[in-house]
Image (tube, helix red, strand yellow):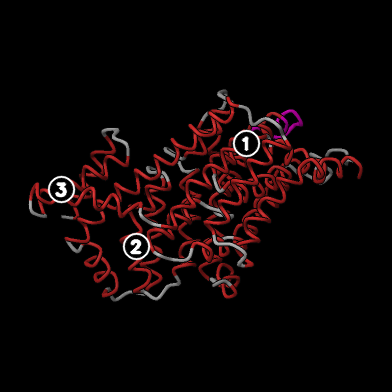
Amino acid sequence: MNIFFVGGLGTLLLLGLPVAFALAMLAVAGMFFFNGGSDAFMQVPIIAYKALDDFSLTALPMYVLMSQVLLVSGVGRDLYEMASRWFRHFPGGLAIATLFCCAIFAAISGSSVATAITIGSVALPEMVKRGYNKRHVLGLLAAGGTLGILIPPSVPMIIYGSVTGESIGKLFIAGIVPGIIMTLSFMVFASYQARHIKDAPATWKERMEATKTAIWGLMLPVIVIGGIYTGIFTPTEAAAVGVVVSFAIAAFFYRNLNLENFKKIIIATVKTNAMILFIIIGAMLLGYIMTILQIPQTITNYATELDVNPWVIFILINIVLLILGMFLETISILVITLPILYPIIIALGFDPIWFAIIMVINMELALISPPVGLNLFVLKGIDRTNTIDEIVKGVIPYAIIMLLLMVVLSIFPEIATFLIKDVH
């Protein structure tokens, strides 16, 4: 049966069928052959409804909407200008500024694609003009964009919480310190790569002017994450607040929320949310028939009964996730694997919040892993003279940094979990 599901899914994906429909078709076939024939199809609408009848998923469309508003508003441009004035006098200062912007925009939007597009379109021409190696810049931007799913708010963390029942607030807070460490590690490496480039420092007046212009972009993550951490509002309420504030910024500060831009925002939001929610429905349908056939239970029992150290299984899980990341996008990987991996992690005694951060870093690697790494194609789209090979070569050192951070988090899991002790 395992061969039926794995082989069937692989075949459908190779035929070019969208992931959501490949999952749903495989689930329906499984119901027909293994669960009572066509009578089992009556469960399809019930399962689809239950898949989306989850209060924690309410935050998802709002964070996507917020990222689209900010993508149109011009916040990324002002953040980049502010950061460049504060950091450009350091060796490799614009590289540091770019990663700083990626981190801040990630904390605003929760989207790696939005981060890569917004910061990349501003930073790439500017850095190349200043003498930075184009390959290094492309790698920096592709890796910097992945910070969007580690630094909260994060769409994959919402999916993880929805599938497993873990607190989304705790997941968000757990991502803060690893996100900061990864950002700083990227900054140190990027600065070393471009250590021969150093621009004239901006005056304090120029810095204050740029900071004043970018202040709303800086305040938004403070409002969202600060509100969650202090208990003022839940992650879902924080998403609603973020949407209201982002619309206010676009309408009253940037004054570019016209009818045309509003239409772009709504269409892009609906498309993104529909794609994610259809994948969730397909995965839940597949999960239903797999549960009926006791496949997750069988795999969990097999994994826990093996006479090996739990860390060996943990390493094997990460290898599987890394391989999947080469061929599938992040949401698909999460909804397909979590119903199987989560019980194994619990049975082996690992912290599920800590594992979520490990899994998100794996998903970051998926975003920059050929042949399907989404951020690679985003960067190619910004400047079509780039080649995927060139971007991949530039991103390899950052992938190594991510792997090293996973090792550090495995040795010191408290890095991800110590802040959540105060979160209820």
Q: Which quarter of the picture shows residue 343? A: bottom left
Q: Which quarter of the picture shows residue 238? A: bottom right
User: Is 92 located above or below residue 315 in the figure?
Assistant: above
| Residue assigned mark 3 | 41
Kindly report the distance in space between the C-alpha atoms of the residues bearing marks 3 and 2: 27 Å
User: For the image shown, how many numbered marks are present on the structure?
Assistant: 3
Kindly report the distance in space between the C-alpha atoms of the residues bearing marks 1 and 3: 44 Å
Labels 1 and 2 touching (C-beta < 8 A): no
User: Is 270 located above or below residue 290 in the figure?
Assistant: above
Helix, strand or loop status at disc 2: helix
Stretch in magenta: 126-134
User: Is 250 located above or below residue 321 in the figure?
Assistant: above
Crowd around label 3: few <14 · some 14–19 · many ≥20 (10 Å)? some
- x, y (%) of residue 204? 91, 45
Of the image marks 1 and 2, the number of the one nearer the N terminus: 1
> In front: mark 1 or mark 3?
3
**Is residue 213 something that shows in the picture?**
yes
Looking at the picture, tell me which residue is in the foreground, 90 or 283.
283
| Residue assigned mark 2 | 341
Looking at the picture, tell me which residue is in the foreground, 166 or 377.
166
Q: Amino acid at mark 1?
A: Thr
- x, y (%) of residue 281? 31, 48
**Is residue 92 something that shows in the picture?**
no
Quarter of the rendering occupied by the N terminus: bottom left
- x, y (%) of residue 354? 49, 67
> In front: mark 3 or mark 2?
3
Q: Which mark is residue 68?
A: none
Looking at the picture, tell me which residue is in the foreground, 407 or 39.
39
